Image: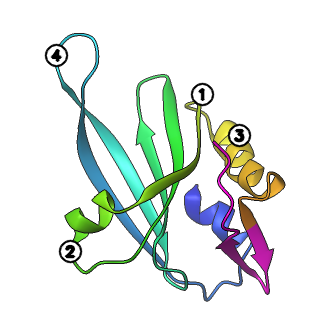
């Protein structure tokens, strides 16, 4: 799904780094694990799309910060620049990701997406 979105804005030779992690979330009750997908644009290190999957919804976040070879330090150094909680549905995810472009958080430039420098919180 993520790759489908990016390939609709890129040529087919674009490179992405994708990671699937398990995160512990804390809220009411006991901590629980949720699956999270992180996708980084190889041409623009420090721009990460982070999706936390829950049973009926998902949180979509766009994070930005300085790249680091230490993955944990890298994640801690990222700043939240945009995000939404959406239904766990394919169309909602595509609408959310395209919304980052519509809001000016991402700019399509020469068949690539890049961070505009403006947060949409």
Contact, mark 1 vs mark 4 (Cβ under 8 Å)? no
Label of residue 91 in the image: 3
SS category of the residue bearing label 2: loop
Mark 3 or 4, nearer chain start: 4
Give the residue at x 58% y 65%.
3
Q: Residues within 10 Å of mark 3 (few under 14, many from 20)?
A: few
Which residue in the rendered view is the most extreme toward the right?
Answer: 102
Report if residue 118 lies within the magenta region: yes
SS category of the residue bearing label 3: helix
Residue 79 figure quarter: bottom left
Mark 3 → mark 4, Cα distance in angstroms? 31 Å
Mark 4 or 2, nearer chain start: 4
Report if residue 37 lies within the magenta region: no
Label of residue 30 in the image: 4
Label of residue 70 in the image: 2
Mark 3 or 2, nearer chain start: 2
Q: Above or below — where is 74 with respect to 69?
A: above
SS category of the residue bearing label 1: strand
Of badges 3 and 1, the one in the foreground is 1
Instruction: Please state which of residues 102 and 55 is positioned toward the viewer in this rendering.
Output: 102
Q: Position of residue 95 (x, y in %)?
A: 74, 44
Mark 3 → mark 2, Cα distance in angstroms? 34 Å
Instruction: Please state which of residues 93 and 112 is positioned toward the viewer in this rendering.
Output: 112
Of badges 3 and 2, the one in the foreground is 2
Q: Above or below — where is 94 with respect to 72?
A: above
Instruction: Please state which of residues 49 and 46 is positioned toward the viewer in this rendering.
Output: 46
Q: Position of residue 59 (x, y in %)?
A: 50, 37
Give the residue at x 63% y 42%.
121
The magenta stretch is: 107-121
Of badges 2 and 1, the one in the foreground is 2
Of badges 1 and 4, the one in the foreground is 4
């Amino acid at each position: 799904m993520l790759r489908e979105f990016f390939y609709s804005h890129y040529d087919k030779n674009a490179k992405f780094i994708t990671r699937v992690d398990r995160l512990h979330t804390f809220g009411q009750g006991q901590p629980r694990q949720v699956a999270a997908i992180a996708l980084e644009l190889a041409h623009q290190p420090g721009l990460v799309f982070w999706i936390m999957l829950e049973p009926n919804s998902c949180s979509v976040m766009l994070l930005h910060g300085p790249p680091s070879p230490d993955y944990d330090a890298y994640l801690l150094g990222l700043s939240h620049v945009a995000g939404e909680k959406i239904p766990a549905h394919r169309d909602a995810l595509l609408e959310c990701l395209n919304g980052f472009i519509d809001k000016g958080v991402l700019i399509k430039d020469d068949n690539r997406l890049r961070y505009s420098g403006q947060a949409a919180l």
